[in-house]
Image (tube, grey):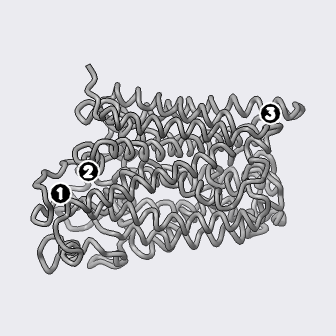
Amino acid sequence: MLTLAMTAIDWTVLIAYFALIVASGIWFARRSNKNTEDYFLGGRSMPAWAVAISIVATSMSAASFIGVPELSYKGDLTYLATNIGLILASIIIAVVFIPAFYKARVQTVYALLGDRFGPNAATASSIAFLVGRIMASGARIYIGAIPASVALFGLEHGLEPSRLLISIGILSVIGISYTLVGGVASVIWTDVVQMVVLVGACLVAIVIIGSHIDTSFAEVIAALQNPAQDASAASKLNLVVPALTADGIDLASQFTLPACIIGFTLLGIGSYGTDHDLVQRMLTCGDAKRGSWSVIAGILLYAPSIALFLVVGLLLWIFYNRPDLTDLVTVAPLDSRRVFLTFIMDFMPTGVVGLMMAGLFAAGLSSLNSAINAMSASFVNDVYRRIKPDRNEAHYLWVGRVGVVGWGIVLASFACFCVFWQRQDGAFNESSGLLTFALSVMTFAYAGLIAVFLTALLTRRGTTASAIASLIIGFVCVFMMQPLLWEQLVDLESIKQTATESGEEPFLLVVLNLAFVWKLTFATIAAFVVAAFPRGSRPTN
């Protein structure tokens, strides 16, 4: 028998959330979709403010809901510094990328590469996006299924593979259904609703956790500044990680100031400028100016949203690790990835548990619905139209709807694979964390895509062959820096032991220990050299 973790009131709240999502999806889908531009771009009539909120909602997956509190619970506030790079990236995208997309009047960003390098380059870029998005969104759906499974089957059984597979299926069916009805317009408006639920759940969590802290604000700050009750201990309120260590430049941490400025700027360009999952929203505005403002506003909204979840992690650390400052004596979860989820199930009042689960479902669904719509748009416009160029718009619209279902099934399948991948290989291990994994997976595709787009928009160089080669080189470079690959080729444990004994770290370990943003940076540089090496034609913008 299944042991349900929620009361009838909690289930009522959760069901009301699902009813609201379905109703909003149907309401905003009343507009007739006559062609693919209506279905995939909302007829280019979406308000910039709604697009900005949708960008934030899509960026904040279930990995953010669980993973961001984990970061501050285990560490500090240095993740906030990544917004420096994201803001810089949004400015570059608003000034360079969005105007070029609108000028070319493209339905997908990869069509711009077709104008610049030829249709084969556009198709190759679209395929790179599809492969990368399968991995990234599939992993995020898996992460989103973890709290869903706990809600359905309880903490004791919720992490069993069979229960996770059921939860993935439920999330996928719901996400596919309302995305299928109204296209991207339905996705954007339901994202607005889901963002309200997501932030609302976070604010409620802060209030409830704070209600158990039985001391002054000043004493809480002092405890966070001196977490080990040792003057030499690092403060949990640190915002910046020094770039230099006793051994030289620290390239192993993803949150140092250089990493945030360089690496996360590139990651932001990849996410908001070359990944059609997010760029698609910016193309739904009436003109380039509104599209540009939507991405800048979205990033500016993202920073305080992330800050709220970091506050949750800090308060959870006080709750579980400083019982002298709380009204309860508790035992901290052994796995920090479950700390927020454990608090929700153990200490949230009846009814509020349902709201928290609604927030988690909102985060999980926003990862799914946006991805399948963008993937279908990319497939129809960049691949299928080349195969069947003489069909009418009604046919392409029908294929687009079928594509939503098909890509939803593909993403759900990869999410199911992640269930067993985690158990077999430890891909989501404690050291990397859920959020880091979710961010790093897409870098396989981003390295080449960033290089090709920068070559197209900023230079007069490049050809079809160099663009395609760049996509391949970017993927291969990131792949070659993955520890999982080298574990199959050499005895890494022996190499590590030898390095420890000798005190000298071999080059292989230096490369494998690079933070994922530095791996992205170096792979992008290599891919850019390949893309821009031959002299090409004048860029279209």
Residue 423: image quadrant is top left
Asked whether disc 2 touches disc 1, contact meaning CB atoms under 8 Å apart, the reply is: yes
Q: Amino acid at mark 2?
A: Val
| Residue 143 picture location, percent across and down | 40, 42
Q: Is residue 98 visible?
A: yes
Choose the circle earlier in sequence order: 3 or 2: 2
Q: Amino acid at mark 3?
A: Tyr
Residue for badge 3 = 396
Judge whether 47 appears above or below 402 on screen: below
Residue at the (69%, 50%) spot, across then down:
468
Residue at image coords 65%, 33%: 180
Q: Quadrant of the C terminus?
A: bottom right
Q: Is residue 146 left or right of residue 444?
A: left
**Looking at the picture, how far across and down is residue 378, in whole percent?**
70, 43
Front residue of this view, candidates 69 and 260: 69
For disc 1, the marked residue is 320
Kindly identify which residue carries mark 2. 339
Q: Residues within 10 Å of mark 3 (few under 14, many from 20)?
A: many
Q: Nearer the viewer, mark 3 or mark 2?
A: 2
Secondary structure, mark 3, is helix
Instruction: Let me know if residue 477 appears in the view.
Output: no
The residue tagged with tag 1: helix, strand or loop? helix
Q: Quadrant of residue 166?
A: top left
Callout 3–callout 2 Cβ contact below 8 Å: no
Answer with left or right where residue 64 lies relative to residue 522. Answer: left
Q: Nearer the viewer, residue 503 or 382?
A: 382
